[in-house]
Amino acid sequence: MIGFLGLGSMGSAMAGRLLETGHDVLAWNRSPGAAEALAGASVASTAAEALAQPVSFSMLANDEAADAVLSVEAIGDAPGRIHVNTASISMRLAGVLQERFESAGVRYVAAPVLGRPPVAAAGRLNILAAGAPDDVDAVLPHLEALSARVWRLGEKPPMANAVKIAVNYNIIHALEAIGESVALVERQGIDANEFTELLSSTLFGGVVYDGYGRIIAEQKYVPPGFTVTLGLKDLSLAEEIAEAGGVTLPTAPALRAVFERTLAEPSLADADWAAIAEVARRDLT
């Protein structure tokens, strides 16, 4: 039995994929309806019950949620278990959680993921895994059920979180670049769909330009796969590790301003993070 904590759009897709590939899942979510709606899963009454399984996974929204749910009390003191944290959290909290689990005799693996919910449901995520080699080996069959590839990034769990933050920082730049370039050509009468297809079919192939290019061209920001608020959270994480490492990020202040303008627009505040493209398109100053 695998415990799974956190059943937002991504967590539900991942837990559903584990069920589809023959794993038994004991699901828990702060809003219990999400666990009850997960076909084939058993429902845990508490986070502690899910964490008590031999292997448990979590996909929680941010540092605050992860810190609260993965508490000392919820983890308990039964040794021999292993926990896999798949969320995008700060390096600081990753270190805190590693120590918290290990102090309880529970092995800890950081395994943040790359991909949107439909990719998770298809078992095609890229997973960034870091932890003791034996610990990663122990959960590798579960990770492989969820992924196209598992990237092993060393023995220190926070390293996987640093890589995920850096990847998301690149995605943010791509979203902004697509939005600005679409605004340029649209003002000249060029169709946005044709332009983004040109980008992804020639010099900018790949899932970001292809997938987000279509979302931006068609302005299909609802329902969100990843919200503007979460995007700003990830930008903040990049700024945090840059400061800790003595790295200057010249574009970060401009990107932060774009996120803040997007969140200030009522029609975009709850949209997909690709909606930051609308700042340039709509001249949201």
Image (tube, rainbow, N blue to C red):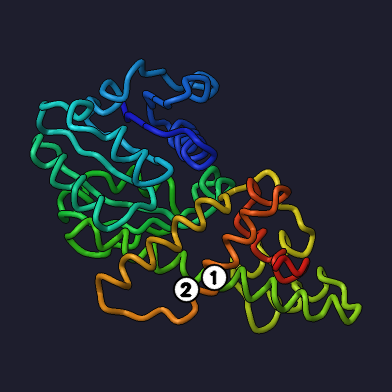
Name which residue lies at 70% across and 76% down: 180
Q: Quadrant of residue 113?
A: bottom left
Q: Quadrant of the N terminus?
A: top left
Q: Which residue is mark 2?
A: 252
Q: Where residue 47 sits: x, y (%)?
A: 31, 25
Q: Quadrant of residue 141?
A: top left
> Marks 2 and 1, Cα distance to the nearest angstrom?
5 Å
Image mark for residue 128: none
Q: Is residue 228 above or below residue 203?
A: above
Q: Secondary structure at mark 2?
A: helix
Viewer-side residue, 282 vs 192? 282
Name which residue lies at 57% across and 53% down: 228
The amino acid type, in three-letter code, at marker 1 is: Leu
| Residue 17 relative to residue 200: left or right | left
Give yes or no for contact between labels 2 and 1 (Cβ–Cβ under 8 Å).
yes
| Residue 231 relative to residue 61: left or right | right
Q: Where residue 181 sits: x, y (%)?
A: 72, 79
Q: Which residue is mark 1?
A: 255
Q: Is residue 269 above or below residue 209?
A: above
Identity of the residue furthest to the front in this view: 285
Name which residue lies at 63% across and 52% down: 272
The amino acid type, in three-letter code, at marker 2 is: Ala
